[in-house]
Image (cartoon, rainbow, N blue to C red):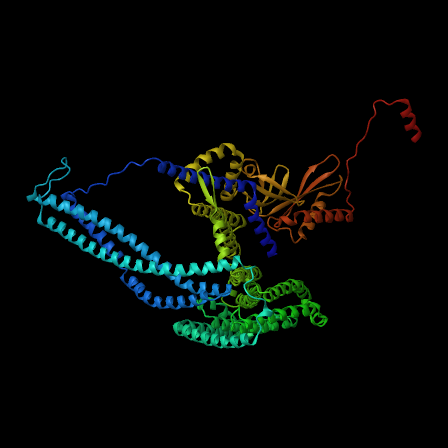
């Protein structure tokens, strides 16, 4: 039943979005915004194109003696505000102190990046080098923004202080008689009449201004000094990153150029000895780098450990609570495996979060993190999936270990290249065996056969990619081979870890919705499946997005793709004087979409949680939900227009003008819209009422923006304009209550005892459970007809849906009771008198006699 209601709600939302009237309404509002923005921009362009008349700077004038005290209080308050804004010494001191520590980090990264750039770096090495600089550049960007803001504030404060000092100095001169007032029309004040307290107040204010100016100038010097140092460091880093980006772009642009000799020409004894020596040195360097990194970020390792133990403890604690649920619902056994292996699940979750915990992680730490994430993910997945997948999971662990062995050797070394060739050849052979093996096909369980068949369809594609990487490495296209082979393998590893994390989160969600406190919430209890599937859909999208970002990163095209996307989003086009970018359109559409989601969520909470608790009637609940829906959509539209940068003053003016045009051109539609609002608030008819308008009788299913939907008894839907429900005569059969009366007319032959007929009818009415006793059934002797005496049976029913069936059942019982009683049911009889007839007809009639 609930799914039907859910589909209905979705249908209502879709109808709201795509009805022509509503689309026209939103389009009109958008056009209004466009015109308003165009008018605003055209006005600003016109004002900008005109030659501005220089406005002379107002010369400060002395303050009248009567206003000195009040102005002094205002000046004191302003000076206090300025001094309060100068209170950034602690923050600036922190920046100064962190700059010294950051200098050592920058020197280390500069040496490491220089070492990478001095050799023959791969795309993966360049990507890693650029990512190592990311936290430093983010910190410098935040400092630069903060210092620039402070510099602008100090400049403005100094300008204000200069004006204040000039004003109060002139005031003091005017009051002491050392300077004549500039305004000759102003009443002059005798110097002797100025109280000494007023003069002292002026002198104190001037002294306060000078002290505040001195403090502001000192703060400005400190800010400018820090800004200069931060800008210098930022420029230094920008130069390094520019060189790394240039090398990366050159590698990407020349990815299909040979960058090494063929593999068969580099295999000799001296190369192997040199590779062994280089491998030992590389391992030593990586261990030393890991020690340095761990010593400088010990707090992050501590946080990671605490997070791991917290997750383990939470899973252990929850395991005892989920056992009753698993025993009651055995189908939850698979999801419960997340809690059966708390250490493994905690490792997967904590490793999934390691990217935020360990920025600038060295190569060896990344390898250890990957190992600590992949192996537990495989152990967990072996519990969550069938045995048919175990071979594939074990193979992923094997190839991951091969990758970690290759990390010891440089990509362009002979050992590194031959290890890569061996790994790609092993991958192709393994995939070919899985694709062709009959024993593997026979081992597949029946319930997993479809999924395995789908996976097998991707095997030729993967084998082709690994074969291509093998050939590229063999013929000397080292960077291309590493990009393709390592990228695909890393994407598969990431997919496994992300999927394992997804299954853990799904298991937690499944049991969280069944346990307190969520299980006590009525809306959760009644709609657990829908809420669960909605959450699952959301986290699947998040997981897919994370995987896409990882894939872009491992293929070293993350920055390139986002640069192109940024350029695309920044594309703009003009319509008249209005200019809008693709990004503005995306933000506008996204804001409206979020507004629709919020509206649907609020309506869901109202319908499932609040309306039943408050005992709100169907009509009132529909009016509240519809009004809330319109309000959220309008507010969302206003926010969306605001994101476009529209001037709401011009927007209101243009909207008023367009509103007048709409009022004249769309009178009927506006009439129906206003009528719909009247129906929602005045509620002469409500959703669910049984009404009759003209010859149409049925239940009112929906009150829309322009028209309402009437569902007739025969199942057909009648679209009724809202204005008809307001202005024309409408019969509402269920306005005050749902009681309906059934009237049955019966005619019997003359000579029948009326009291006997009335007793029979009353007895039949009294035996029906669905007939109300209050009002009680009535039998009336209604008429003496031409050929019958007529009676009328009147009964009341509570449920209008049973009216037709109950009437048919009662008529059947009445007919059977009258037959059993031998009571005749007459039919009309007529005597025909022929005034004239022809001879042939007369002979025929005589012959028939």
Given residues 169 and 113, the one toward you in this image is 113
Q: Give residue 832's position: percent from left, percent from top.
A: 82, 29
Quarter of the image where one finds residue 750 = top right
Residue, far left: 192
Regarding residue 334, the answer to whether it shows in the image is no
**Closest to the observer, 319 or 421:** 421
Q: Residue furthest right?
A: 847
Instruction: Locate residue 302: give its quadrant.
Output: bottom left
> Is 608 rendered above or below residue 512?
above
Examine the image and state in which quarter residue 460 appears: bottom right
Q: Residue at x 30, y 66 (%)?
A: 97
- Relative to residue 734, is residue 449 drawn left or right? right
* Left or right for 81, reference 789: left
- 332 w.r.t. 234: above or below: below
Residue nearest the observer in this picture, 143 or 823: 143
Identify the residue at horizontal 14%, vertical 49% (top origin).
202
Query: Residue 358 location in percent, x, y?
Result: 44, 69
In what quadrant of the picture does the C terminus appear? top right
In the picture, measured across the screen, residue 82 lies left or right of residue 640, that is left
Asked whether the viewer can see residue 794, the reply is: yes
| Picture quarter with the N terminus | bottom right
The x, y position of residue 55, in whole percent, is 26, 38
Q: Position of residue 680 (x, y in %)?
A: 51, 44
Q: How many marks?
A: 0
């Amino acid at each position: 039943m609930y799914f039907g209601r859910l589909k209905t709600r979705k249908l209502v939302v879709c109808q709201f979005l795509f009805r022509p009237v509503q689309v026209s309404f939103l389009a009109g509002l958008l056009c209004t915004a466009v015109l308003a923005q165009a008018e605003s921009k055209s006005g600003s362009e016109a004002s900008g194109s005109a030659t501005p008349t220089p406005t002379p700077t107002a010369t400060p004038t002395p303050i009248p003696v009567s206003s000195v005290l009040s102005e002094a209080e205002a000046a004191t308050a302003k000076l206090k505000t300025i001094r309060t804004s100068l209170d950034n010494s602690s923050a600036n001191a922190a920046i100064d102190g962190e700059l010294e520590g950051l200098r050592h980090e920058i020197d280390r990264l500069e040496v490491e990046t220089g070492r990478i750039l001095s050799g023959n770096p791969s795309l993966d090495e360049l990507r890693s080098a650029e990512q190592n600089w990311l936290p430093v550049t983010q910190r410098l960007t935040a400092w630069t923004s903060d210092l620039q803001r402070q510099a602008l504030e100090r400049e403005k404060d100094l300008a204000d202080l200069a004006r204040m000092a000039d004003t109060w100095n002139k005031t003091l001169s005017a009051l002491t008689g050392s300077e004549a007032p500039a305004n000759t029309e102003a009443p002059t004040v005798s110097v002797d009449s100025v109280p000494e307290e007023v003069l002292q107040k002026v002198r104190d204010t001037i002294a306060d201004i000078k002290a505040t100016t001195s403090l502001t100038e000192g703060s400005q010097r400190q800010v400018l000094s820090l800004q200069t140092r931060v800008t210098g460091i930022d420029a230094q880093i920008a130069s390094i990153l520019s060189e790394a980006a240039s090398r990366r772009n050159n590698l990407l642009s020349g990815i299909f150029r040979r960058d090494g000799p063929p593999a068969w020409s580099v295999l000799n004894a001296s190369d192997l000895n040199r590779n062994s020596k280089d491998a030992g040195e590389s391992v030593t360097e990586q261990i030393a780098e890991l020690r340095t990194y761990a010593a400088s970020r010990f707090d992050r390792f501590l946080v990671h450990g605490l997070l791991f133990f917290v997750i383990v403890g939470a899973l252990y604690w929850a395991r005892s609570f989920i056992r009753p649920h698993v025993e009651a619902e055995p189908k939850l056994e698979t999801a419960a495996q997340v809690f059966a292996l708390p250490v493994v699940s905690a490792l997967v979750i904590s490793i999934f979060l390691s990217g935020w915990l360990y920025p600038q992680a060295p190569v060896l730490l990344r390898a250890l993190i990957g190992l600590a994430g992949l192996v537990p993910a495989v152990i967990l997945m072996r519990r969550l999936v069938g045995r048919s997948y175990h071979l594939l999971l074990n193979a992923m662990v094997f190839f991951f270990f091969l990758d970690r062995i290759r990390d010891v050797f440089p990509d362009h070394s002979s050992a590194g290249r031959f290890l890569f060739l061996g790994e790609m050849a092993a991958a192709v052979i393994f995939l070919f065996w899985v694709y062709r093996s009959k024993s593997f096909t026979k081992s597949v369980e029946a319930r997993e056969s479809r999924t395995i068949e789908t996976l097998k369809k991707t095997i030729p594609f993967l084998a082709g990619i690994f074969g291509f990487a093998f050939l590229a490495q063999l013929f000397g296209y080292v960077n291309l081979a590493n990009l393709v082979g390592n990228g695909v393998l890393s994407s598969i590893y990431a997919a496994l870890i992300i999927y394992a994390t997804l299954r853990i989160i799904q298991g937690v969600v499944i049991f969280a919705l069944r346990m307190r406190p969520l299980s006590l919430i009525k809306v959760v209890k009644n709609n657990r499946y829908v809420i669960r599937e909605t959450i699952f859909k959301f986290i699947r999208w998040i997981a897919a997005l994370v995987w896409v970002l990882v894939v872009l990163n491992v293929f070293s095209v993350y920055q390139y793709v986002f640069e192109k996307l940024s350029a695309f989003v920044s594309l703009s086009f003009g319509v008249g004087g209005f200019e809008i970018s693709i990004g503005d359109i995306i933000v506008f559409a996204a804001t409206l979409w979020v507004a629709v989601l919020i509206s649907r969520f609020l309506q869901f909470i109202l319908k499932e949680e609040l309306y039943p608790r408050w005992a709100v009637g169907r009509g009132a609940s529909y009016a509240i939900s519809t009004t809330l829906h319109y309000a959220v959509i309008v507010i969302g539209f206003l926010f969306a227009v605001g994101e476009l940068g529209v001037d709401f003053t011009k927007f209101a003016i243009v909207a008023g003008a367009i509103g007048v045009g709409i009022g004249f051109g769309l009178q009927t539609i506006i009439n129906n819209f206003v009528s719909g609002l009247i129906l929602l608030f005045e509620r002469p008819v409500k959703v669910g009422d049984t009404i009759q308008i003209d010859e149409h009788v049925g239940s009112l299913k929906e009150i829309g923006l322009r028209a309402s939907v009437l569902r007739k008894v025969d199942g057909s839907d009648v679209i009724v304009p809202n204005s008809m429900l307001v202005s024309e005569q409408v019969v509402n059969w269920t306005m005050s209550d749902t009681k309906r009366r059934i009237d049955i007319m019966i005619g019997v032959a003359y000579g029948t005892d009326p009291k006997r007929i009335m007793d029979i009818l009353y007895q039949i009415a009294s035996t029906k459970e669905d007939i109300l006793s209050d009002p009680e059934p009535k039998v009336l002797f209604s008429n003496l007809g031409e050929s019958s005496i007529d009676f009328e049976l009147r009964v009341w029913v509570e449920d209008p849906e049973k009216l037709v069936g109950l009437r048919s059942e009662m008529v059947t019982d009445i007919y059977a009771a009258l037959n059993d009683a031998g009571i005749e049911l007459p039919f009309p009889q007529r005597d025909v008198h022929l005034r004239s007839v022809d001879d042939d007809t007369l002979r025929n009639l005589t012959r028939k006699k």
